[in-house]
């Protein structure tokens, strides 16, 4: 079995030690970090999501998979972020209040940093006011919100309400969100994945 396939299997098994070892091996073999991420770590997590939905595995299994995912992502982080490049914009990101899913948001933060943005990561379970207050305090150009639960999507609307008459741009993402939802709440952009988030934020901060 190839090394990326094995990483995805160990994500599914929640074996963070093996994920750590194999990610290091893949890096040592000079495999592109983007491939290790997509075909190894994310591929494994996608299967975990399917199995959880179909009641084949349970919450503790998902938690272990998330820990294994973090172990691999931490190793890839320095390769995805180029150090010392000048900031091309400032963005506040976070997962909205009530929502504890932060893997996708972390990935978006890593890719934005890699592209040269200064990122203020508020973490998860972030109240609407905090997004706005931090963006104003840090003089950010953009606020980025992540939600993985249908029940927490309305928090994005609350942030939009607080931002009325403000020039700060907004981007949303996360599995249950969509372009239509972004339009409905008045967000400036919707991104389907981390690479797309970088393209959208570049567009929002251009000129
Ligand atoms: Co939960 N969970 N979870 N979970 N979990 C989902 C989201 C779910 C779809 C699983 C399922 O049923 N198939 C389901 C949500 C259903 C719904 O509302 N539609 C669900 C549920 C129900 C729950 C609980 C309610 C379970 C329970 O307690 N009974 C509970 C809720 C807790 C809470 O938040 N209050 C819960 C808990 C957890 C864990 C804590 C165990 C763990 C999270 C650990 C962590 O994040 N630290 C977890 C996990 C891991 C998942 C799944 C399996 C994987 C999510 C993930 O990390 N994916 C997920 C199933 C799935 O998504 N297939 C599931 C990998 C990640 C790289 O992708 O996050 O989509 P993603 O991010 C992508 C894009 O969406 C996009 O770019 C990222 C990179 O490509 N993106 C953005 C994300 N944010 C963006 C922001 C942007 C732009 C793009 O701009 C700012």
Image (spheres, grey):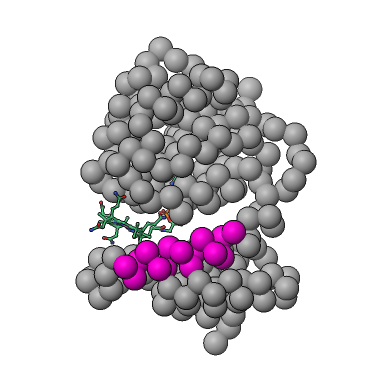
> Of 153 and 77, which appears nearest the observer?
77
Image quarter (top left, top right, bottom left or bottom right) of the N terminus: bottom right
* 146 to 204, vertically: above or below: below
Indicate yes or no whether the magenta region holds residue 77: no
Highlighted magenta segment, given as a residue range: 60-74
Picture coordinates of residue 26, whole percent (x, y)? 66, 74
Residue at point 59% right, 48% down? 110
Image quarter (top left, top right, bottom left or bottom right) of the C terminus: top right
Which residue of the protein is positioned furthest toward the right in this rendering?
Answer: 84
- Tell whether 156 sits left or right of 19: left
- Res. 189 image quadrant: top left
* 110 to 28, vertically: above or below: above
> Of 180 and 168, which appears nearest the observer?
168
Q: Quadrant of ligand 1?
A: bottom left
Indicate yes or no whether the magenta region holds residue 67: yes
* 193 to 161, vertically: above or below: below
């Amino acid at each position: 079995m190839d090394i990326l396939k094995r990483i995805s299997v160990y994500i599914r098994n929640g074996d963070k030690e093996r994920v750590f070892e194999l990610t290091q091996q893949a890096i040592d073999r000079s495999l592109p970090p983007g491939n290790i991420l997509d075909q190894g770590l994310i591929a494994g997590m996608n299967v975990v999501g399917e199995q959880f939905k179909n009641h084949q595995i349970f919450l503790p299994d998902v938690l272990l998979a998330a820990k294994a995912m973090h172990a691999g992502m931490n190793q890839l982080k320095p390769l995805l972020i180029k150090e010392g490049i000048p900031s091309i914009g400032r963005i506040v990101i976070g997962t909205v209040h009530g929502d504890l899913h932060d893997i996708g948001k972390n990935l978006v933060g890593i890719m934005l940093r890699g592209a040269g943005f200064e990122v203020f990561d508020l973490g998860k379970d972030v109240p609407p006011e905090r997004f706005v207050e931090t963006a104003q305090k840090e003089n950010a150009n953009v606020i980025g919100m992540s939600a993985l639960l249908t029940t927490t999507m309305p928090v994005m609307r609350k942030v939009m309400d607080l931002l009325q008459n403000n020039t700060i741009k907004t981007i949303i993402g996360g599995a249950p969100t969509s372009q239509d939802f972004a339009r409905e709440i008045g967000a400036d952009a919707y991104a389907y994945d981390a690479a797309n988030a970088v393209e959208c934020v570049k567009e929002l901060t251009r000129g």
